[in-house]
């Protein structure tokens, strides 16, 4: 598809892409990736969306085609009319705890969806690459590889993983809920998919930097995260939830390691998160 085939008006801006809406067709939406984003990342998102839509098992935004303009690659999607849970939280059109319960139910439904996942990349293999990329020390590498292997061994069967599971990536329309931003979808243990919400709402330091997108203070975010887990694991037993949080925290350490590599973090941000990841890994290593 040609960029100039449609007239585009600017929409929201994200960390890896800018969004545009068609002026000539309300049902088209363009996700234009920033220059420097590897081609294989864009192609992976496009192919994942196409494959899932063909399978008709999970409701996701429908990819219609790819384009390139001024050195930037983009994906044209069928536009979804609705609001993300993050938007609804920020404008307080839904109570945080009601939102957390709905989000937990949808995450559980996603992980329980029966579908062929053999075509998806293995998250285990991706994290292995990231561990070796981020850390140079043999002992540290071995430490995190052993944690990853134990999580995968103890978690049962692999499932479809969204890859960036948080309230900003599920959209409510008039009659359904739809997952968006599935470019990092993969296969692996469900616990690894819950890490994104822990990192954004409960992880040391990071929780203090995401108050604005959700409109929640730190205390509210922690309550949201707890209710999300209670719904997902179908228990309100405080001791059980504390144990799940500890196991997920180890997954979160692996999630951050993977993000450092995929988003090519550098400098102080990379060093700071590497230190936190190591501390959290040592702190919760007995809970797998």
Image (cartoon, rainbow, N blue to C red):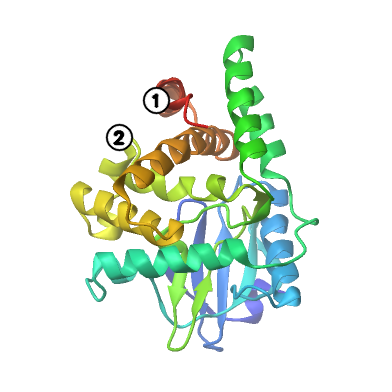
Could you say whether the residue bearing mark 2 is in a helix, strand or loop? loop
- How far apart are labels 2 and 1 at the CA level? 9 Å
Could you say whether the residue bearing mark 1 is in a helix, strand or loop? helix
x and y percent of residue 70 in the render?
63, 58
Which residue, given by chain and number where applicable, does mark 1 sit on?
276
Which residue, given by chain and number where applicable, does mark 2 sit on?
205
Taking 94 as reference, is 52 left or right? right
Q: Which residue is located at x 68 percent, y 74 percent?
A: 57
Q: Nearer the viewer, residue 97 or 181?
A: 97
Q: In the figure, residue 120 lies in which quadrant?
A: bottom right
x and y percent of residue 195 in the render?
47, 45
Q: Which residue is located at x 51 percent, y 80 percent?
A: 80
Q: Which residue is located at x 59 percent, y 74 percent?
A: 61
Q: Which residue is located at x 52 percent, y 74 percent?
A: 178
Taking 264 as reference, is 73 left or right? right
Q: Nearer the viewer, residue 266 or 81?
A: 81
Q: Is residue 54 above or below residue 118?
A: below
Q: In the figure, residue 100 lies in which quadrant?
A: bottom left
């Amino acid at each position: 598809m040609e960029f100039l085939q449609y007239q585009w008006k600017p929409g929201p801006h994200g960390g890896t892409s800018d969004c545009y809406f068609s002026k000539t067709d309300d049902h088209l939406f363009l996700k234009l990736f920033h220059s420097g984003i590897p081609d294989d990342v864009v192609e992976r998102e496009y192919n994942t969306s196409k494959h899932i839509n063909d399978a008709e098992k999970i409701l996701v935004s429908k990819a219609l085609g790819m384009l390139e303009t001024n050195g930037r690659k983009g994906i044209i999607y069928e536009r979804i009319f609705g609001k993300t849970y993050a938007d609804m939280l920020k404008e307080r059109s839904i109570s945080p705890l009601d939102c957390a319960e709905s989000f937990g139910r949808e995450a559980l439904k996603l992980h329980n969806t029966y579908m062929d996942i053999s075509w998806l990349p293995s998250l285990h293999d991706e994290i292995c690459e990231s561990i070796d990329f981020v850390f140079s020390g043999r002992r540290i590498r071995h430490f995190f590889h052993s944690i990853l292997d134990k999580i995968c061994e103890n978690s049962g069967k692999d499932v479809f993983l969204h890859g960036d599971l948080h309230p900003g990536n599920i959209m409510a329309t008039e009659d359904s809920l739809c997952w968006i931003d599935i470019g990092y979808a993969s296969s692996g243990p469900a616990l690894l998919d819950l890490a994104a919400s822990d990192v954004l709402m409960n992880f040391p330091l990071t929780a203090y930097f995401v108050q604005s997108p959700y409109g929640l203070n730190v205390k509210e975010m922690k309550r949201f995260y707890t209710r999300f887990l209670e719904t997902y694991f179908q228990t309100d037993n405080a001791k059980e939830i504390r144990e799940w949080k500890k196991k997920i925290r180890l997954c979160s350490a692996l999630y951050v390691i993977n993000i450092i590599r995929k988003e090519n973090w550098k400098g102080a941000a990379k060093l700071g998160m590497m230190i936190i990841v190591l501390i959290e890994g040592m702190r919760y290593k007995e809970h797998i």
